[in-house]
């Protein structure tokens, strides 16, 4: 009788403990190291613009990544193409208009492709988000990977890498005919960032 009672008690204890093990609370992660790349592949020239000044936060639950939400942004004036004159032109009011629209923004709406994440494993995902350039917001579909690294006694890390395409004309940016052979209308955007749980507002910039 004592053995049966002990067995029943053990089973009940396991059943009660299971939700606590399989379900985690959503945690806010703050970007501490990130890079965004914009590639224009035109017939006569491939232009690459980069910035390491990515800021933002993402709320994430490894047990249910469909609930993930987050917003990331980069200052237009931080973009570098390797040509100072071209950088000034891109930031001017005839192109991205950095004074009126100082940031490029990506907001996560939906994450799919997996139900949950395993620790220290890259997981392929699809991300639906709002992409804002030149003050105009469009819905985009991105593909990428997410890696969650729990830290014993420290702060969990999150690595997010996604890629998608966007058209300048969709954001009210027209490409003059005189430069169409050197500047493509369709741009490939890549975002590679690391975020850490409970990090202070300050962030470090990768070089």
Image (tube, rainbow, N blue to C red):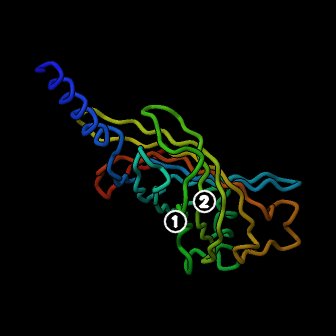
**Quadrant in the picture for residue 148:** top left
Residue that label 2 marks: 128
**Which numbered mark, 1 or 2, is in the foreground of this view?**
2
* Residue 86 found in image quarter: bottom right
Q: Give yes or no for contact between labels 1 and 2 (Cβ–Cβ under 8 Å).
A: no
Look at the picture and state if 19 lies above or below 200.
above
Q: Which label number is shown at residue 158?
A: none
Question: Badge 1: how crowded within 10 Å, few (<14), some, or many (20+)?
Answer: some
Secondary element type, mark 2 = strand
Write the residue at 71% across / 62% down.
166
Foreground residue, 178 or 75? Answer: 75
| Residue in view at x 37 percent, y 54 percent | 30
**Looking at the picture, how far across and down is residue 56, in whole percent?**
43, 59
Identity of the residue drawn at 79% across and 65% down: 185
Q: 10 Å neighbourhood of mark 2: few (<14), some, or many (≥20)?
A: some
The residue lying toward the viewer, choosing from 109 and 167, is 109
Q: Where does residue 202 sit, x and y in percent of width and height?
A: 33, 56
Q: Quadrant of the N terminus?
A: top left
- The location of residue 172, given as percent across then percent down, is 72, 78
Q: Residue 75: which numbered mark, if any? A: 1
Q: CA distance from mark 1 to mark 2?
A: 22 Å
Q: Indicate the secondary structure of the residue bearing disc 1.
A: strand
């Amino acid at each position: 009788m004592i053995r049966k009672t002990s067995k029943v008690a053990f089973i009940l204890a396991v059943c009660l403990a299971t939700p606590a093990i399989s379900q985690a609370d959503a945690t806010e992660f703050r970007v501490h190291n990130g890079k965004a790349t914009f590639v224009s592949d035109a017939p006569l020239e491939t232009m690459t613009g980069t910035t390491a000044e990515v800021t933002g936060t993402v709320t994430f639950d490894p047990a249910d990544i469909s609930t993930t939400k987050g917003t990331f942004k980069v200052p237009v004036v931080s973009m570098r193409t390797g040509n100072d004159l071209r950088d000034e032109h891109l930031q001017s009011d005839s192109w991205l208009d950095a004074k009126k629209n100082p940031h490029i923004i990506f907001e996560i709406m939906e994450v799919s492709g997996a139900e949950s994440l395993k620790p220290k494993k890259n997981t392929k995902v699809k991300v639906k988000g709002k992409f804002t350039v030149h003050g105009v917001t469009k819905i985009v579909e991105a593909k990428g990977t997410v890696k969650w690294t729990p830290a014993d006694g420290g702060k969990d890390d999150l690595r997010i890498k996604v890629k998608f395409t966007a058209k300048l004309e969709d954001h009210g940016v027209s490409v003059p005919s005189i430069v169409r052979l050197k500047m493509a209308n369709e741009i490939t955007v890549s975002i590679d960032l690391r975020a850490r749980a409970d990090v202070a507002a300050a962030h470090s910039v990768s070089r």
